[in-house]
Image (cartoon, rainbow, N blue to C red):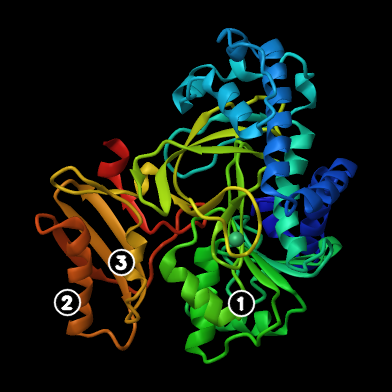
């Protein structure tokens, strides 16, 4: 079901049937008895207490390390001591983790089979690979329980906000479910089994968006999930037509797969009239964080441990690369794995009341940094556009060290003042040495997988 020629040649009712069958297959793999048991248990532990969560983490860590020492060649060769529980779980966790060096991605990439547990029949494992349009794709193996736990983390957040399995919903994901040569609505297909409507990401042109806006107003769906950059396109079309959704139509907007950019969030909230509940996860199934109404990301403590290699620190937060230890996947345990993302951990507990580690944000794959002529790496440049109401969408490209190209879709209100203000904002972050080429466009293309990238720097990636 990937827009191949066979699927593409089917009449729409049969394409709907194919989507329904694929949806049923996905659900059968995800929503196992283990999923339902674990969800019930995490619904309780998630809001229990800081101490309860740390004790649970210590117990899961000990069990993980015991299995890794015995059955996983990479860890067996490290010769780490047997893990010991401490009456203070924070101390206990620290001592156990300290025995492990930080695991770089390249170590895993060079010999992934050394991470495969010998205690598990490999024919039962599910194969995957890291996503990402750039960088190295790593081979991955999962147990069914790991996949189930990933979805427990996702569903705990939803259930907590009043969404139930089986509720009608919309998906805006990377699957190509509508043939590209189709020029008239419907630009969506139905998975009737899960009451899911799948909107095509690849037909969202100026001409077609009004049909999407009609469809979203008519839908019975109670939540929407998918790429935030596409929610944004849809949200902007709704606002331009003066047709935001009424409050309460959607219980939540659930972004996945991309970072939620600052300049997208405001339009999405206004147009959909619903809270955005963000999530951070990774194909390695070694880390999970789920959002809250305060706009923060809470570590799913039952799923793993997240350490920060501190590069910056204030009284309120610490910031740096994330080092994660995942409890869910016995197939290839990842202990102190440097996942390649950067995060900002709050030193305060969150006003929403959920205990455990809280992050203010997570972002920053290396290719999303611009490098200045004097060698500084600057991330989170999407914030430049947050307050620029005269700009509909923007992208920064860097092909050489001394210049950037800024692609802009202007709002009708865009003026010389807007341009001057924008240049000041960019200069305040990147300095005066870099050349800035503004390029006004009507559309900013997505990547081949349908994702939007706010910053694409060849210099940053190869640096
Ligand atoms: Zn919170």
Q: Position of residue 445 (x, y in %)?
A: 41, 62
Q: Is mark 3 within 8 Å of ligand 1?
A: no
Looking at the rendered image, the quarter that the C terminus falls into is: top left
- Looking at the image, which residue is at 48% across and 18% down? 110
For discs 3 and 1, the disc positioned in front in the rendered view:
3
Which residue is labeled 1 in the image?
Answer: 184
Give me the C-alpha separation between circle 3 and circle 1: 37 Å
Residues marked 3 and 2 touching at CB (< 8 Å)? no
Farthest-out residue, left: 433
Which of the two discs, 3 and 1, labels the residue nearer the N terminus?
1
Q: Specify whether 39 is left or right of 402.
A: right
Residue 384's label in the rendered image is 3
Q: Position of residue 252 (x, y in %)?
A: 67, 71
Q: Is residue 203 visible?
A: no
Q: Residues within 10 Å of mark 2 (few under 14, many from 20)?
A: few
Above/below status of 281 relative to 396: above
Q: Residues within 10 Å of mark 1 (few under 14, many from 20)?
A: few
Residues marked 3 and 1 touching at CB (< 8 Å)? no
Q: Specify whether 432 is left or right of 332.
A: left
Q: Residues within 10 Å of mark 3 (few under 14, many from 20)?
A: some
Query: Between residues 138 and 42, which one lies in front from this camera angle?
Result: 42
């Amino acid at each position: 079901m990937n827009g191949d020629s066979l699927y593409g040649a089917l009449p729409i009712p049969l394409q709907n049937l194919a989507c329904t069958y694929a949806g049923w297959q996905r659900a059968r793999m995800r929503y196992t008895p283990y999923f339902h048991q674990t969800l019930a248990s995490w619904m309780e532990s998630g809001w229990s207490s800081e101490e309860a969560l740390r004790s649970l983490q210590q117990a899961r860590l000990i069990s993980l390390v015991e299995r890794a020492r015995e059955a996983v060649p990479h860890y067996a060769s490290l010769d780490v001591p047997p893990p010991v529980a401490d009456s203070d779980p924070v101390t206990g966790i620290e001592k156990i983790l300290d025995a492990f060096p930080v695991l770089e991605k390249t170590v895993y990439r060079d010999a992934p089979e050394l991470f495969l547990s010998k205690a598990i029949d490999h024919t039962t494992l599910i194969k995957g690979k890291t996503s990402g349009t750039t960088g190295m794709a790593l081979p991955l193996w999962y147990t069914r329980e790991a996949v189930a736990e990933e979805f427990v983390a996702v569903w705990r957040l939803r259930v907590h906000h009043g969404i139930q399995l089986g509720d009608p919903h919309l998906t805006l994901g990377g699957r190509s479910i509508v043939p590209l040569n189709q020029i008239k609505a419907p630009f969506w297909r139905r998975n009737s089994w899960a009451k899911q409507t799948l909107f095509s990401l690849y037909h969202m042109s100026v001409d077609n968006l009004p049909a999407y806006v009609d469809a979203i107003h008519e839908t019975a769906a109670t939540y929407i999930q998918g790429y935030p950059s596409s929610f944004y396109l849809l949200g902007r079309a709704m606002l331009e037509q003066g047709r935001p959704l009424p409050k309460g139509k959607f219980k939540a907007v659930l972004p996945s797969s991309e970072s939620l950019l600052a300049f997208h969030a405001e339009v999405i909230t206004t147009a959909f009239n619903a809270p955005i509940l963000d999530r951070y996860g990774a194909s390695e199934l070694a880390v999970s964080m789920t959002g809250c109404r305060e706009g923060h990301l809470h570590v799913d403590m039952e799923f793993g441990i997240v350490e920060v290699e501190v590069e910056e620190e204030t009284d309120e937060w610490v910031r740096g690369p994330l080092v994660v230890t995942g409890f869910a996947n016995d197939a290839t345990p990842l202990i102190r794995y440097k996942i390649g993302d950067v995060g900002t951990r709050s030193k305060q507990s969150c006003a929403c009341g959920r205990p455990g580690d809280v992050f203010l944000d997570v972002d920053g794959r290396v290719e999303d940094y611009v490098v200045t002529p004097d060698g500084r790496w600057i991330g989170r440049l999407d914030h430049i556009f947050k307050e620029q109401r005269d700009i509909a969408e923007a992208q920064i490209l860097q092909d050489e060290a001394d210049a950037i190209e800024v692609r802009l879709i202007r709002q009708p209100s865009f003026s010389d003042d807007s341009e001057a203000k924008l240049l000041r904002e960019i200069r305040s972050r990147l300095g005066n040495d870099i050349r800035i080429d503004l390029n006004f466009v009507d559309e900013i293309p997505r990547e081949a997988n349908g994702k939007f990238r706010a910053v694409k720097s060849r210099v940053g990636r190869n640096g």
